[in-house]
Amino acid sequence: MPYIKQEKRKEIINEDLVRLQACDCAGDIQYVIALMIKSYVRRKHLNYQTCNDIMGALVGAQQEFYRRVVAPYEKEKIEENGDI
């Protein structure tokens, strides 16, 4: 996961993202991701490199989510309920 500098975070994230709190289901999250991808493709143009960059970013985000959220949750539940 790319841990970007604080200054860059402020450039990327602004008040508009406060609306993300309205996401209530997976479909809402997917819609927001699709909008981000659409914006990125518009700026970078649709070509192999752009598609590859987007797919790599999605895979990396998925892996980071698993590492930081899912795996610790699973470990907690194994400790709580016992292993297989």
Image: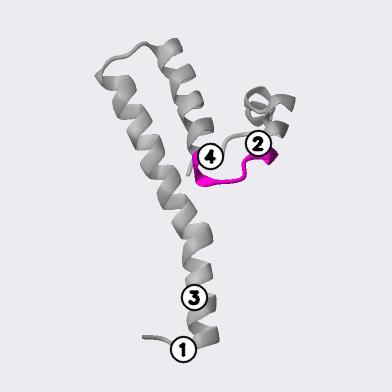
**Of residues 35 and 7, which is closer to you in this image?**
35
Residue behind mark 3? 75
**1 or 3: tag closer to the N-terminus:** 3
The span from disc 1 to disc 2 (Cα, nearest Å) is 36 Å
Q: Position of residue 32 (x, y in %)?
A: 54, 31
**4 or 3: tag closer to the N-terminus:** 4
The span from disc 4 to disc 3 (Cα, nearest Å) is 25 Å
- The scheme the figure's colours follow is one colour
Q: Amino acid at mark 2?
A: Leu
The span from disc 3 to disc 2 (Cα, nearest Å) is 29 Å
Q: Is residue 63 left or right of residue 15?
A: left
Residue behind mark 2? 20
Q: Is residue 17 left or right of residue 47?
A: right
**1 or 2: tag closer to the N-terminus:** 2
- Residue at the image position 62 percent from the left and 40 percent from the top: 23
Q: Which mark is residue 29?
A: 4
Q: Amino acid at mark 4?
A: Ile
Q: Looking at the image, is mark 1 or mark 3 nearer the viewer?
A: 1
Asked if disc 4 and disc 1 are in contact, CB closer than 8 Å, the reply is: no
The span from disc 1 to disc 3 (Cα, nearest Å) is 10 Å
Magenta-drawn segment: 20-28
Residue behind mark 1? 82
**4 or 2: tag closer to the N-terminus:** 2
Q: Secondary structure at mark 4?
A: helix
